[in-house]
Image: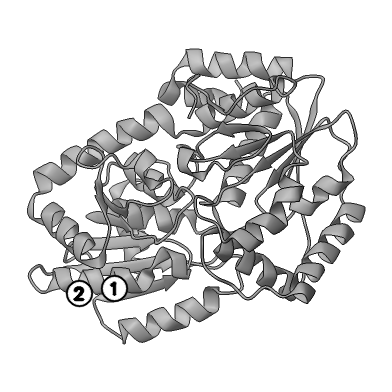
Amino acid sequence: MLQCDQYATIVGKNELDELKRLAQYMAERRVVMVNSTRIGGGVAEILNRMVPFLQELGVSIRWEVIQGDEPFYEVTKKIHNALHGRAEDLTEPMLQHFLDIGSRNAEQIQLEDEIVFIHDPQPITLVDKRKAPSRWIWRCHIDVSRPHRSVWNFLKPYILKFDAAISSAPAFAQQLGMRQVLIAPSIDPLSGKNRQLPIEEVNAVLQRLGVPQDRPIITQVSRFDFLKDPMGVIDAFRRVRRSIKCRLVLAGGTASDDPEGEKVLGLVKERAANDPEIHLLLLPPNSDLEINALQRASTVIVQKSLKEGFALTVAEALWKGKPVVASAVGGIPLQVRHGYSGLLVHSVEGAALAIKQLLNNPTYAKQLGENGREHVRNNFLLTRHMREYLLLFLTLGIQEEVVRFDGKPF
């Protein structure tokens, strides 16, 4: 039995059989995925699960990672922030260094596959190396609904060299003379981060991490990033604590392509001010068990992002049947249907009120969590994600207007 057959009990045999049939049609095409890091962040997490799964199905797919120096990642972080709409000081020398590193990687990475799949801006200039008859896809995991125009205009000539662009939400689409497709990210229900855990294992992990379970636990799991607003989470928690005894866990790490992580972590420590009821956990890469246990032990999961491409942590929490309070930004509203699979908020005050509502009404919180789990099962699991990628690969020769995979234009 293939390892992938384990998914049949979760998504059904028919969906798995469809995946296998689609993979058979890909027998003559080679695919390469390219991004900027193997550890840290949602893109690496998805590829770590997806690539071996597709290989097991018989798809000829491999994964390459570009190499850059510290100045390169400082530039790409500024580009990342600017695409989220923040003004950044990007000088000509900085942009030239970005191009130089791209050219260096183009010489080092073999890109002769029939389908070349580029993730996010960091490796985007590799498209200059494309050769016919290969097909190139740009997958943007960022909320580019209101990008800083100068940076968008810098990237746009490269984007237009691709055959297709993928976004996570309708609002992220831009006016481009090319095929655009909506494909939401996904979680793997059988990964170490999402598999079922016995309560004894959950308790052991919380004890090892030094997080008491004597009070309701409010948790946000995310990189220490300004756009995740960890300071705002602390402020919301302190409002909640005025009337309800509870604990806050801010758990996360840094990524090799994100040089701002240490700075943000330092500011979060200042805001927390050694508060004994605020637990800051800097987790190393591959802390899947710890994150799984923390989410399962939590009473409420928060994702108070200021900007967000999708937020896999929301889908992870919903899959565990947890009530979620999250900002109504980016791809989060695809996952959290307000009042059905969670509560959407727009401010620190709104987050505090929503958290208090859930803590004071556990029956309502439980119903939101149950609805959220089914919403993720139906829309945001890895098998659906791979099916949509395979369908795109197989139809790349067909040019059409921007469409969703349910056939509706947006």
Residue under the point 17% across and 38% down: 367
Looking at the picture, does residue 87 appear above or below residue 127?
below
Picture mark count: 2
> Residue 347 at what x, y percent from top left?
26, 63
Whether residue 95 can be seen here: yes
Q: For the N terminus, give its image quadrant.
A: top right
Q: Nearer the viewer, residue 65 or 299?
A: 65
> Residue 314 at what x, y percent from top left?
38, 48
Residue 117 in which image quadrant: top right
Q: Badge 1 is on which residue? A: 234
Looking at the picture, does residue 325 appear above or below residue 275?
above
Residue under the point 27% across and 58% down: 346
Residue 29 in which image quadrant: top right
- Using residue 231 as the reference point, say whether residue 382 is left or right of it: right
- Circle 1 SS class: helix
Residue under the point 44% across and 58% down: 307
Spatial distance from mark 2 to mark 1, Cα to Cα? 6 Å
Whether residue 298 can be seen here: no
- Using residue 146 as the reference point, say whether residue 248 is left or right of it: left
> What kind of residue is marked 1?
Ile
Q: Nearer the viewer, residue 390 or 219?
A: 390
- Pointers 2 and 1 in contact (C-beta within 8 Å): yes
> Residue 161 at what x, y percent from top left?
78, 41
- Circle 2 SS class: helix
Q: Badge 2 is on which residue? A: 238
Q: Nearer the viewer, residue 285 or 180?
A: 180
Number of other residues with Cα within 10 Å of mark 2, as a class: few under 14, some 14 to 19, many 20 or more: some
